[in-house]
Amino acid sequence: MAINLHRPISLMNNPRGGAAGIIIALVLVLALAGGGGFLAYGKYFKKEPLRSKLASLKVKGELIRFTHDQVSGALYRNMIMLDDILVMMDAELDRLKRIGKKFPNQRGIVASQTEEMQKARERMARVLIDVNATLEKMYVTWLVDRSEGTGQIRSQKGTLTRQLADAIRGEAVLIGRIRTNPDAAS
């Protein structure tokens, strides 16, 4: 049996289509890798744009940006989370008021829940207001004297972050009850 060394073997002209199958498989693998990369980017790497204001409290956008850029990312995230919780509590208070109007004979049930929610909201709002007042002082100090402002940031950022985290943790049961109620979102 003689082997023809002068005629190259073409994989694409293979009568069984072996090379075409390999190319199709390669394209599918690359498409899956690209799709997986896109999903991973969207879930783990894509960052939410910085907020420039809080819904529950009037705060200058530059103060929020200062908190994120110069003070602490954790403090910024706690501040945003507490703001979101306060907005959620406002929506729940509105829902409870609607229920109270709809069922005036059950006023006692609704009134106790409303009172508890208002007290919790006031406590959390007070912490957010106090932290923002401290941040504003730090920001002005930082604008006037960077070294002194940086010293204040280093000494107080952990305390401020813990204050916000403690406020959220202190009302965790109430927050969990709101979040697990499917009607609370409406």
Image (spheres, rainbow, N blue to C red):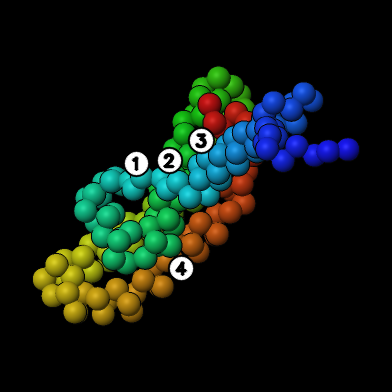
Q: Which residue is mark 3?
A: 92
In x, y percent, where is residue 42? 50, 42
Question: The residue under label 2 is which amino acid type?
Answer: Val
Mark 4 or mark 2: which comes first in sequence?
Answer: 2
Residue located beneath label 1 in the image: 55
Nearest to the eye among marks 4 and 3: give it: 4
Query: Three-letter amino acid code at disc 3?
Result: Glu
Checking the image for residue 162, the label placed there is 4
Q: Nearer the viewer, residue 118 or 65?
A: 65
Please, which residue is most extreme toward the front here? Answer: 2
Q: Is residue 26 visible?
A: yes
Label 1 environment density (alpha carbons within 10 Å; few <14, some 14–19, many ≥20): few
Three-letter amino acid code at disc 4? Arg
Q: Residue at x 79, y 25 (%)?
A: 16
Per the model, the C-alpha gap separating discs 4 and 1 is 22 Å
Query: Residue at the location (29% across, 45% down)?
Result: 53
Quadrant in the picture for the N terminus: top right
Residue at far top of view: 102
Q: CA distance from mark 2 to mark 1?
A: 7 Å
**The quarter of the displayed image where residue 66 is located:** bottom left
Q: CA distance from mark 1 to mark 3?
A: 15 Å
User: Is there a contact, CB below 8 Å, between mark 2 and mark 1?
Assistant: yes
Marked residue nearer the N-terminal end (2 or 3) = 2
C-alpha span from label 4 to label 2: 21 Å
- Image coords of residue 46 (percent x, y): 45, 46
Task: Single out the mark in the foreground, 1 or 3.
Answer: 1
Tell me whether circle 4 and circle 3 mark residues in contact (CB < 8 Å): no
Q: CA distance from mark 2 to mark 3?
A: 9 Å
Q: Earlier in the sequence, mark 4 or mark 1?
A: 1
